Image (spheres, helix red, strand yellow):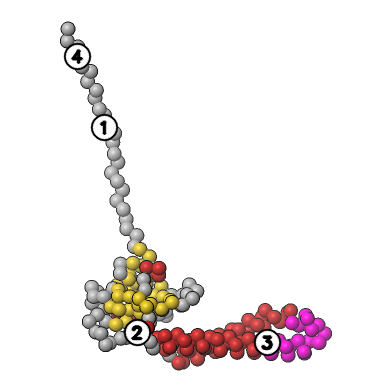
Amino acid sequence: MPTYFYTDCVITDLKQIDLHSNEFTARINGRTAKRLAMTHDLYHHLMGADRSAKSRVWFYAPGFNKALVIAAVRPAGQEHSVLRNRAIRSPYKMLFRTLLAGLLAWFATWALLAIPVLSWYGANAPKGVLVLETLSIQIGTGVAALYLSYLLWVRAKMNRLDSWQPGDIAPYTRALKTKTQPAPPTHPTTVKVIAPELVE
């Protein structure tokens, strides 16, 4: 289930995971984020920002083990300036992803149902192929329509940042591991017992 929230935080130690990727590792409020997705303009802004000043950051967590996405950043001291993640709102990416989702669903329908449907119709193979084509087109179109509606919903959420609720970044990050110094070995102390002298 995707979640949307904002928090005031300091993002430091940004490092790109791959040269051809828009995912980074970072420290957020002193905690480690292993996968943080953003556009390169947001990355360059955060790299040049005052490291000690907190910025308001809107996060989008898609779920399904995907990277945490920075949807927008409001620089510290700039109440009316918000830098948005333009990749989420791009109509070209929305169209490409919708077509890709439909094609994958169409192909998966053929791959999974070809043998059961053709064996069901047996000798009447042309009728089985016609049924399979109809099913694959309907499923592919339905998946594409659902995915497009989901992308439009995400885009609508990006246009209404003021309606997002504050949230905690801790579930999406890990605490830094600190090296603890081993305790010095303790030596048992010997206690001398002195017997009292008897006086006659």
| Discs 2, 3 touching: Cβ within 8 Å | no
Q: Is residue 182 above or below residue 88?
A: above
* Residue in the image at 37% along x and 68% along y: 170
Instruction: Name the amino acid, label 2.
Output: Asp
Q: Are marks 4 and 2 in contact (CB under 8 Å)?
A: no
Q: Residue furthest right?
A: 123
Q: CA distance from mark 2 to mark 3?
A: 42 Å
Element type where label 4 sits in the image: loop
Identify the disc placed on residue 43.
none
Magenta range is 117-136
Q: Which residue is mark 4?
A: 197
Q: Is disc 1 surrounded by few (<14), some (14 to 19) or many (20+) residues within 10 Å?
A: few
Q: Would you name the residue on which mark 2 appears? A: 162
What label does residue 189 carry, if any?
Answer: 1
Which mark lies nearer to you, 1 or 4? Answer: 4
Q: Are marks 4 and 3 in contact (CB under 8 Å)?
A: no
Q: Quadrant of residue 161?
A: bottom left
Determine the CA span between mark 1 and mark 4. 25 Å
Alpha carbon of mark 2 to alpha carbon of mark 1: how far?
A: 66 Å
Identify the amino acid type marked 3.
Leu
Q: Earlier in the sequence, mark 2 or mark 3?
A: 3
Q: Nearer the viewer, residue 17 or 114?
A: 114
Mark 3 lies on residue = 135
Q: Which sits in the foreground, 133 or 157?
A: 157
Chain-order first, disc 2 or disc 1: 2
